[in-house]
Image: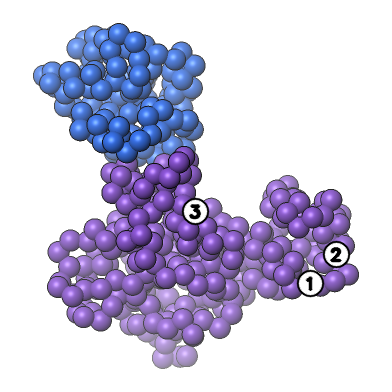
């Protein structure tokens, strides 16, 4: 890959999705784009870059951006945020919201494991007030990732990373060598393709937003833009959940961290007033 | 240091599992079948057992049923690790007293995730 090609890919990823692509990590760019080049019928990445320059075809541009945005996903990844959601957030919100639905958004859900983990928790939630409803939304920038998410079909390897065996037996059916989520869990999640740097106001209000391990892959101005868009979707008692190693307070004043809970944030009322 | 007994009739599997579990901080003992594993447990009960199903002399489920009936045999956290992947077979292993279940093939991430699930990592 020539430096010019790397620059082209990095510029596209930044402009279209706010992604921070380190030009020094050519191995990473190659590992993401080589399969795409093959799939699109190019002999190599260089030829795909040439086609991008000459044709500027939107479909190919987005395919490149989606490939570079590719995230990792696992059921109940990092565990702690899911324990917090199950034990604290869900019961509290159920009490506060009454018959109003509790809306939860996995905003960069990749192939769907995070959204389905939340759906399994909602399904098994005990002791919620009668009539409590939980709506789970999953979104990602990648159409391909969302297709896999919607199918709810995972390999044996994927279902063994983070998913307790009893949950597997309860919520999945074995389909040849793979495992498919039951229709009951699949139907609990609504999917939508969303680019987080676009206008998010159309998404509506959310009580809890899971936005984990996505901001760290974005350039600082875009991180700020995304966080300040997300804060507008949360009610005063809503919560934002970032990756345990991600912070909002160094990026914007829109959120306040919850003491002792890495990654957990609430709205900063002062910021709301200023906005 | 926590102890883990790796029970599998394949020397290769025992070697791979040993390496992964040692990296996770376990002291490892090995057994090639259920009978040998029972002898180990009766001499010194381990904290964890990684257990194959299909083995000569005594299979994993028979071993586990006997272990759970032994004094102190309810203590070890037992993670099955087998090529059996049918839901009914997995339920059988859980009913026999398994805490978690790994479907072979496995890698370090899966072993770590499953041992975390039973509170050992």
Badge 1 sits on which subunit? A
Badge 1: residue crowd in 10 Å (few <14, some 14–19, many ≥20): few
Which chain appears blue?
A: B
Residue under label 3: A73
Residue at image x 79%, y 55%? A41
Badge 2 sits on which subunit? A
Q: What element carries label 2?
A: helix
Which label belongs to residue A57?
1
Residue at image x 74%, y 66%? A60
C-alpha span from label 1 to label 3: 29 Å
Which chain appears purple?
A: A
Q: Can the viewer see residue A129?
A: yes
Comparing marks 1 and 3, which lies closer to the viewer?
A: 1
Q: What element carries label 1?
A: loop
* Residue A263 screen position, x and y as percent: 41, 62
Q: In this view, does A275 lie above or below B67?
A: below
Mark toward the start of the polypeptide (1 vs 3): 1
Residue at image x 80%, y 63%? A7
Residues flagged by tags 2 and 3 on a common chain? yes
Q: What element carries label 3?
A: loop
Which label belongs to residue A51?
2
Q: In this view, does A64 lie above or below B62?
A: below
Badge 3: residue crowd in 10 Å (few <14, some 14–19, many ≥20): some
C-alpha span from label 2 to label 3: 31 Å
């Amino acid at each position: 890959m020539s430096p010019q090609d790397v620059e082209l890919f990095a510029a596209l990823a930044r402009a279209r999705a706010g992604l921070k692509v380190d030009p020094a990590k050519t191995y990473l760019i190659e590992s993401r784009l080589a399969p795409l080049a093959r799939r699109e019928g190019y002999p190599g990445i260089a030829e795909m870059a040439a086609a991008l320059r000459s044709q500027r075809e939107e479909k190919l541009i987005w395919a490149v951006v989606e490939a570079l945005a590719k995230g990792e996903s696992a059921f109940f990844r990092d565990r702690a945020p899911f324990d917090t959601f199950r034990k604290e957030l869900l019961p509290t919100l159920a009490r506060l919201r009454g018959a109003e639905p509790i809306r939860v958004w996995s905003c960069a859900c990749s192939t769907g494991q995070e959204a389905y983990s939340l759906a399994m928790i909602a399904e098994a939630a005990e002791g919620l007030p009668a009539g409590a409803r939980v709506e789970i939304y999953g979104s990602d920038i990648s159409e391909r990732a969302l297709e896999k998410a919607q199918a709810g079909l995972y390999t044996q390897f994927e279902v063994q990373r983070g998913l307790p065996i009893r949950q597997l037996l309860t919520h999945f059916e074995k389909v040849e060598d793979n495992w498919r989520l039951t229709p009951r869990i699949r139907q609990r999640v609504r999917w939508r393709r969303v680019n987080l740097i676009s206008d998010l106001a159309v998404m509506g209000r959310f009580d809890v937003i899971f936005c984990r391990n996505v901001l760290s892959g974005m350039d600082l101005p875009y991180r700020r833009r995304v966080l300040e868009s997300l804060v507008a979707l949360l009610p005063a008692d809503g919560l934002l959940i970032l990756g345990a190693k991600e912070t909002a307070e160094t990026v914007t004043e829109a959120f306040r961290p919850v003491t002792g809970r890495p990654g957990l944030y609430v709205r900063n009322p002062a910021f709301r007033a200023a906005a | 240091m926590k102890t883990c007994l790796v029970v599998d009739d394949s020397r290769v599997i025992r070697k791979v599992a040993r390496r992964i579990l040692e990296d996770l901080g376990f002291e490892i003992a090995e057994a090639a079948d259920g009978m040998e594993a029972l002898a180990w447990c009766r001499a010194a009960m381990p904290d964890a057992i990684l257990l194959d199903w299909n083995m000569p002399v005594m299979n994993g489920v028979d071993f586990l049923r006997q272990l759970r009936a032994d004094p102190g045999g309810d203590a070890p956290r037992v993670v099955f690790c087998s090529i059996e992947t049918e839901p009914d077979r997995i339920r059988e292993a859980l009913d026999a007293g398994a805490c978690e279940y790994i479907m072979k093939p496995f890698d370090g991430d899966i072993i770590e995730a499953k041992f975390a699930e039973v509170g050992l990592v």
